[in-house]
Amino acid sequence: MQPFIHEKPIYIQIMDRIKRDIVSKALVEGSPIASVRELALQYQVNPNTVQRALSECEREGYLKSDRTNGRFVSADETMVEELKNKLLTQWVSELVSQCQSIGLDERSVCELIKATYEKEGKLQ
């Protein structure tokens, strides 16, 4: 597990991890989410921080709460696809900004991405 970075608030980083787990199918619709205390111990953060992250994920519709059984993933396939597109757009935007800041041109970046996919055997 990667440590938290300081560029974003920790609760947002926890939200990002939950969303990545949903998109990668590590968590699927109906999957239970660990308790606030378990997650706080796992991430080594204050339980209030975890509670805020989970509440925000719930507000955005990725999780649902059941008072007696805890929280569950509520994201259906449509929501997962929308989240994938949203995350991809965000990551590409961040990558482009970073590449531009060090003077890399579009062609070089695209060639490197393609070469990396081929090297890792993931080009489809």
Image (cartoon, rainbow, N blue to C red):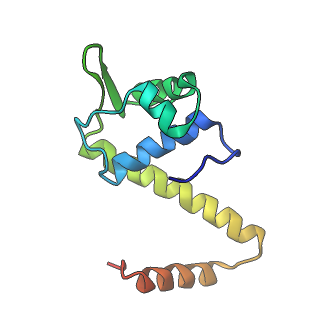
Left-right relation of 98 to 92 = right
- At x 72%, y 70%, the residue is 100
**What is the quadrant of residue 98 in the picture?**
bottom right
Q: How many labels does the image show?
A: 0
- At x 70%, y 44%, the residue is 6
Vertical relation: 88 (above or below) 49: below
Q: Where is residue 1 in the image (x, y as percent from the top left)?
A: 50, 52
Is residue 114 visible in the rendered image? The answer is: yes
Q: Position of residue 51 (x, y in %)?
A: 49, 23
Q: Position of residue 88 (x, y in %)?
A: 47, 58
The C terminus sits in image quarter: bottom left
Q: Which residue lies furthest to the top in this view?
A: 67
**What is the quadrant of residue 69 in the picture?**
top left
Q: Where is residue 35 in the image (x, y as percent from the top left)?
A: 38, 27
- At x 48%, y 38%, the residue is 42
Of 8 and 112, nearer the camera is 8
Is residue 82 visible in the rendered image? The answer is: no
Left-right relation of 26 to 53 = left
Vertical relation: 92 (above or below) 78: below
Vertical relation: 32 (above or below) 8: above
Of 3 and 53, nearer the camera is 3
Q: Which residue lies furthest to the right in this view?
A: 102
Vertical relation: 25 (above or below) 119: above
